[in-house]
Image (tube, rainbow, N blue to C red):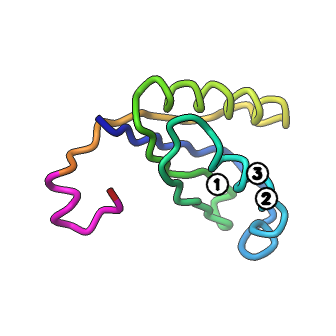
Amino acid sequence: MAKLLQIDFPFTGPFGSEMAEALRDLAVSITEEPGFIWKIWTENESEKDAGGIYLFKTEETAQAYLEKHTARLKGLGVEKVHAKIFDVNEALSKITAGPI
């Protein structure tokens, strides 16, 4: 069963097109993670938060990526990383055009 991983953390920028340019190589590397299906990048400049919603093939691959990404963020000085792993109800998600 696919697993949805939700991550958010304090982020001071850059945002928007500058963020896209600065993090392009990271985005490409994420596509090579085991079990990775897709990611939606999230950002809130006014709240100084960023993160993403990811879909992984299994809980094990979602958990492994969460551990890797949390360590990377902590290495960059991010102290609080919020994350949850969810089951995906594929039948209902397909009805509402979820990218399953």
Q: What SS does tag 1 mark?
A: strand
Q: What SS does tag 2 mark?
A: loop
Q: Which residue is mark 2?
A: 23
Give the x, y percent position of residue 66.
58, 31
Q: Is residue 1 left or right of residue 12?
A: left
> Which residue is found at the position 21% from the left and 67% from the top?
96
Name the mark on residue 26: 3
Give the x, y percent position of residue 41.
58, 59
- Using the image, determine if residue 16 lies above or below residue 74: below
Q: What SS does tag 3 mark?
A: helix
The one of 10 and 42 positioned closer to us in this rendering: 42
**Magenta residues, start to end:** 91-99
Q: Residues within 10 Å of mark 2 (few under 14, many from 20)?
A: few
Does the CB distance between marks 3 and 2 fall below 8 Å? yes
Q: CA distance from mark 1 to mark 3?
A: 14 Å
> Which residue is found at the position 44% from the left and 34% from the top?
84
Q: Is residue 63 left or right of residue 30?
A: left
Name the residue furthest bottom: 17
Q: Residues within 10 Å of mark 1 (few under 14, many from 20)?
A: some
Q: Residues within 10 Å of mark 3 (few under 14, many from 20)?
A: few
Does the CB distance between marks 1 and 3 fall below 8 Å? no
Q: Amino acid at mark 1?
A: Ala
> Which residue is found at the position 32% from the left and 56% from the top?
100
